[in-house]
Image (spheres, coloured by chain):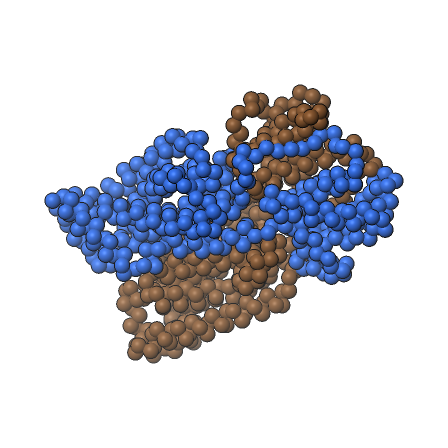
Chain colours: A blue, B brown
Amino acid sequence: MKMKRFWILLKTELLAWRHDPITAMGGLIPALFILLAFAPLFGGRLSFKIAVINHDAGSYGAVLLRTFDQVLSPFGTPYYDVYAFEEEKAWERYHAHYLDGIWIIPEDFSAGIEAGKSPTIDMYFSNYNDDRAKNHRIYSTEIMWSFYETIGYPFPPLEVAEVYPLPVMIEWFPVIAVGVVLLSFMLGGMINMFMLTHKEHVSRITIEFGMAPRSLAWVLLPKLILALLMGLVTGTVLLGIVYLWTGSWPGHFIGGVLLLAGLVILFWAPPSLLIGMHARFFAGMIATILTGLTLFFTGGGLGLVRANWESVPLFSRLFPNVYAVDPMRDFILFSVMPPDWRRVLLILSGFAALSLLVCFPLAGRRLRRIG
Amino acid sequence: MKRFFMLLSSEVKLFRTAVPIHLVAILQPSAMYLLMTLILVNPTFDMNMEKPETSLEAELLEELMKVGSPIGLPYIRPVTVDWDGGAVVRQVVRVEDRSGIPTAVQYFGLIDSNLVKNYRNRLTAAALGLWNNQLGSRAVHIQQRPWLPRDVSYNVYFGMAMLTMATFLAASILGGFLTAQEYESRTIVEYRLSPASVGLILGARMVRLVLSSLLSAGVLLASIGIIAHVWSGGILRVALVLLPLSIIAGCLGMMAGLLLCRTIPAFLVGLVVTFVGWILGSSFGLAAGFGRTYECISRCMPFTHAVELLFPRYYGTTIGLPGVSALVLVCMSLGMLGITVLVYRFRILRQE
């Protein structure tokens, strides 16, 4: 009998979806568009656009000019895209900020190298933000290192080398894409929970629920299960899109990804239900979804958390996303078990349990009052 | 005019029916900015290096400390560690003898290419410092000619770009909500029966949306001033730049409400368009600084044009083509107003 009641309620909730497909896909649509927006921003060619004005009377200026194309960044592209502008046009474009910088190689550059008289190059660059200014400064060292090697300067006192733990380096965009996938899982659960609550408010089913003689767990459980399932479905669809796009797929670790996502959804769905009931669904929905988006930006959506833990703000540490995002990347991008897997599961389970234990009784009480 | 002000007053009073929504729409961008400033890229990186035991290693450590901006922050904060060769979380530098050649080997953990790039460049900068010391007067000197006397914190640019997002978000989601709410509460019938002209009705709503969005931008403007200690010059000019953006967003929100008739989808449309437009619209840096595809898409976004027009207010110099940007914003806002009137006629008046 109890199971029958559960299935009836589950079917009722399922029917609610049929009338609002846009909202039902609410976890997929924003995340997909955000992913599409990030693709040209961080997935494109990130080389600096510069002009090199070569006044050199000798040959070293030309050698330096060739070096710009030869030195590749870990993105697999040169650090600089050198534009062959006339000097006047180069300055014009630089001042309009269509060029990131201009290098001026003086007439006596080769002579200075041959005579050992401190050859100098002028590097004009924009420092409107300190991060890009930093890149100008440290990229130039890569160019000079390669230039010294090319022109046969004496060997450096200390060579440089690096060891990366995987045969292929993980690119930045897939790292962001996994952050967006987690956002999709989370939004999918939250928006569907909101939608189901909203429909019940509009059709005044909440009154019937509130007056039900049975435990309200039978009302809340189907809603939670459906929100969880829809969150998992929307996130998995986005994961499929990420696979087609970047080739990153968790393979046999898919279960681990869904487990992580499920625990995150179980944290977010109950407050979505509760806030939806208290704040008349909409204000609560805006607040929670914007909090989710803010968490995406501040809680490891754009970069690896484990390697930057000290930069994670306290606010973000109060939510499970920041603990789930890197293990999810371990599964999807690196195809390895997270080194802190048990600890992560424990933390996420704690978050989910706390959320359920606090929000469900409060939601039940609220439902009774509405009734 | 009297009727317009009555309509406007009624629109403003709608605030009381949706206080939390207004508070979220107006304050959220500032809250997000305040949080983002905590995690925004900081040029100074902690860099692990095995404790130096030889003079060469000590020299490398010294060079690592020197890498930085002469008019800004250092780029490396060296952290000396005892490393047993075990798993690496982020990176660690160890000086090794490789075929008789002393080599600074950087061991990475599971990090992405962007972090690898940052660490690689920093180590190269330090090692080049050693090489330049050895070369003496043969070393090539790069004379840095930065555009500004001091490197400007990324917080300033990011905040300035977020002004466009704050403006757009408030107008689009409030416009969407207030309009869709008319359907849900069935007050839409009053518009159908109203003798007031379309211009008055939409004008009153638009004015209150513009005021709300400018209020949101104002709160963010103050936040940027407090956090980054940079205050925009000419508040009125900033408002003038943001005005067309708020009109575009308000029109978008109203159209979403009129076409979708439900608050949640209308909100989602406003949210998605705001964030996607903002990300594509020079949110993280000037459009020209990213790839060509990004730049092309970005120039179609009103956000980019607004950012380029706001730039002089924070940096004291114009960029791009201000006249063209202003024209684009005006044309876009007029176009959106026209489309909104058509949609209003189609959805409301046609069903009389």
Specify whether A170 is left or right of A291: right
Q: Residue at x 59, y 45 (%)?
A: A75
Return the x and y of residue A37 as percentages of the image width and height: 49, 55
Quadrant for the C terminus of chain B, please.
bottom left
Give x and y (percent) for residue A124. Answer: 73, 50
Count of number-bearing discs:
0
Looking at the image, residue B320 lies above or below residue B158: below
The correct choice, above or below, for A48 with respect to A345 in the image is below
Between residue A226 and residue A81, name the one nearer to us.
A81
Q: Quadrant of the N terminus of chain B?
A: bottom left
Image coords of residue B66 (percent x, y): 69, 34
Residue at left 37%, top 61%? B266
Q: Is residue A207 visible?
A: yes
Residue at left offset 22%, top offset 59% = A203
Would you say A369 lies left or right of B316 here?
left
**Hey, which quadrant is residue B190 in on the image?**
bottom left
Which residue shows up at 42% across the image and 60% down it? B270
Q: Percent from the top left, x then y, of residue A99?
A: 67, 56
Task: Say which of A111 and A311 sits in front.
Answer: A111
Can residue A275 be seen here? The reply is no
The residue nearer to you, when weighing B207 against A149, is: A149
